Image: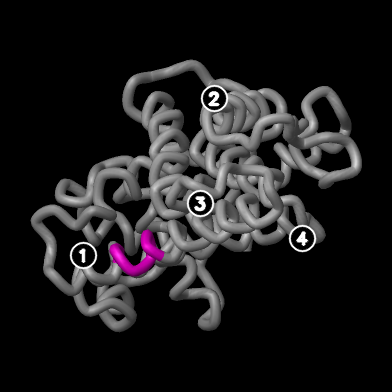
């Protein structure tokens, strides 16, 4: 199921096997537009094409629905990144695609991304909710840390810097670029441009001397090469094609 479905029009009545997924997509849309605390479960049910009783049959509370909707969004984002990383062995290329994927999804699906920014920390929600979100965020940090360790092992990045701190700083830059678009009405920059800039600025102080790198270079991967048909195809796959 594509992330592009998240901001489609009102959902058609789902088949039984798709009902839960339709509810999660509707929750991301409604919670994202209204805000979690202001949104009504009735609107989520209406958008999903189900009755309110069906909603509570699948999710015991509004908080439980939020938790599962955010996990669903994270799973979609992770799957999109994994698809982009297929066949990529260079760890710096992996970092590049991490930024490009994140920003492309944020740019195309602002409501859902804004919901993740504001509600994933779990402020005012249950300890169980916060623990679940922390586990999901930690998994993402560990993935980026792994890329940093690969880069250090290959001599691309200085080995005297803690890879976990590198991952935290890197993700902080990615998050700030997304925050600018979502909450400060920043310009809709090209995801490839954002990814290249973040990579250049972040890695310059920690790069091993003499080890230059060209991100998204031809032949490294089929996504996000600005000015090529491959770039347009990648943007279309992210729900971020021309004119959006």
- Which residue in the protein does label 2 denote? 201
Q: Is residue 204 magenta?
A: no
- Residue at the spot 37% in from the left edge and 63% down from the top edge: 138
Which range of residues does the magenta coloring cover? Answer: 133-138
Residues at marks 1 and 4 touching, judged by CB atoms closer than 8 Å:
no
Going from the N terminus, do you reach mark 3 or mark 4 first?
3
- Which residue in the protein does label 1 denote? 130
- Which residue in the protein does label 3 denote? 6
Magenta span main SS = helix
Q: Residue furthest top?
A: 187
| CA distance for labels 2 and 1 | 32 Å
Q: Position of residue 51 (x, y in %)?
A: 32, 71
- Which residue in the protein does label 4 denote? 86
| CA distance for labels 2 and 4 | 26 Å
Q: Nearer the viewer, mark 3 or mark 2?
A: 2
Residues at marks 3 and 1 touching, judged by CB atoms closer than 8 Å:
no
Residue 229 seen in the figure: yes
Instruction: Give the crowd class for mark 1: few <14, some 14-19, many >=20 residues within 10 Å.
Output: some
- Residue at the spot 57% in from the left edge and 57% down from the top edge: 149
Name the image quarter holding the N terminus: bottom right
| CA distance for labels 3 and 1 | 24 Å
């Amino acid at each position: 199921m594509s992330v592009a479905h998240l901001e489609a029009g009102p959902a058609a009545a789902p088949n039984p096997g798709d009902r839960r997924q339709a509810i999660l997509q509707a929750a991301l849309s409604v919670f994202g537009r209204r805000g979690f605390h202001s949104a009504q479960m009735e609107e989520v049910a209406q958008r999903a094409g189900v009755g309110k009783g069906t909603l509570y049959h699948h999710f015991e509370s509004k908080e439980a629905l939020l938790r599962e909707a955010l996990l669903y969004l994270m799973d979609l984002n992770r799957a999109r990144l994994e698809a982009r990383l297929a066949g990529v062995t260079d760890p710096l290329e992996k970092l590049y695609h991490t930024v490009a994927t994140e920003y492309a999804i944020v740019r195309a699906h602002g409501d859902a991304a804004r919901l993740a920014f504001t509600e994933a920390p779990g402020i005012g929600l249950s300890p169980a909710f916060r623990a679940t979100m922390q586990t999901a965020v930690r998994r993402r940090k560990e993935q980026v840390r792994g890329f940093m360790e690969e880069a250090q092992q290959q001599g691309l990045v200085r080995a005297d810097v803690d890879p976990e701190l590198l991952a935290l700083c890197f993700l902080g830059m990615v998050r700030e670029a997304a925050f600018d678009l979502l909450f400060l009405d920043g310009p809709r920059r090209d995801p490839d441009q954002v990814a290249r800039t973040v990579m250049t600025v972040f890695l310059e102080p920690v790069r091993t001397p003499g080890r230059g790198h060209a991100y998204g270079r031809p032949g490294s991967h089929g996504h996000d090469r600005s000015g090529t048909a491959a770039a347009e195809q990648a943007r279309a796959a992210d729900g971020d094609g021309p004119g959006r």
